[in-house]
Amino acid sequence: MNSSSQGDEKIGLTKGDALVIVDLQNDFLPGGSLAVPGGEQVISVLNGYIERFARQGLPIFATRDWHPKNHGSFVAQGGPWPEHCVAGTRGADFAPSLHLPISTQVISAGIEVERDGYSAFETPFFQQQLEKAGTTRLFIGGLATDYCVLNTVLDALALHYRVCLLFDAVRAVNVKPQDGEKAVQEMVRRGAKPIKQAMIL
Ligand code: VGL
Ligand code: ZN
């Protein structure tokens, strides 16, 4: 994706918009057990988006990976990942430098042993809260591009939400080097609009 494909188009935030920050948790950041390369770089960008949504009184959601100690995705259970984001541990806490307002609605995912929880929509509570807030357009960024961001965005599109992908505020695990790029391509192909902060009025 080059910058010209995002153009100089501007986007005004309006009623029905909501910000969704995916899994900005210590374990996905440097020093964490499943650190996403460059993950720390999205924090200041997300703080900028948070400020704009908060200023307009628009809802802000923060999802979190919130696993039981014996989660099926962990190596000890034969899964692909090191132990990460165990509910209640420091690694599962939101990044301290992420300035989440007190009104932020927290959505926990991956709480069942046998389910990956890669999409916040696996938690029915998420969609309920979106409907309650009259949300029609989601601005989604966070970690990781090729797992939780990808799955949350694809579910949102399947449920007919409009989706703006915060292209400047996502980073990929890249188990294979192109995974992040492919994930972005798939999200865009399915209808997500890649945006960057400067486009927001
Ligand atoms: C995630 C790998 C394992 C994510 C969660 O938040 O993208 N990735 N669990
Ligand atoms: Zn996980």
Image (cartoon, rainbow, N blue to C red):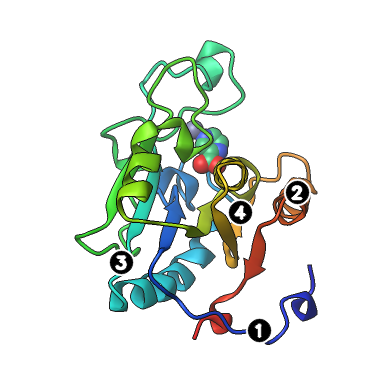
In terms of image quadrants, where is residue 175? top right
Q: Nearer the viewer, mark 1 or mark 2?
A: 1
Report the side of 127 relative to 138 (left or right). Answer: left
Residue in the image at 36% along x and 22% along y: 68
Tag 3 and tag 2, C-beta contact below 8 Å: no
- Label 4 CB, ligand 1: below 8 Å? no
Category of crowding for the residue at label 2, using alpha-carbon neighbours closer than 10 angstroms: few (below 14), some (14–19), many (at least 20): some
| Residue 188 to residue 157: above or below | below
Q: Give how far apart the Cα atoms at labels 1 and 2 are.
A: 22 Å
The kind of residue tagged 2 is Glu
Name which of mark 1 and mark 4 comes first in the sequence.
1
Q: Position of residue 168 (x, y in %)?
A: 60, 69
Name, please, the residue furthest toward the top. 77
The type of residue carrying mark 3 is His
Q: Position of residue 132 (x, y in %)?
A: 30, 49
CB-based contact (under 8 Å), mark 4 and mark 3: no
Instruction: Name the residue that disc number 4 marks.
Output: 37
Q: CA distance from mark 2 to mark 4?
A: 21 Å
Asked whether mark 2 lies closer than 8 Å to ligand 1, one says no
Mark 4 vs mark 3: in front: 3
- Mark 1: which amino acid? Glu
Towards the viewer: 130 or 83: 130
Q: Nearer the viewer, residue 152 or 43?
A: 152
Tag in front: 2 or 4: 2
Label 3 – label 1 distance at C-alpha: 27 Å
* SS for dot 1: loop
Label 1 belongs to which residue?
Answer: 9
Q: Which residue is mark 2?
A: 186
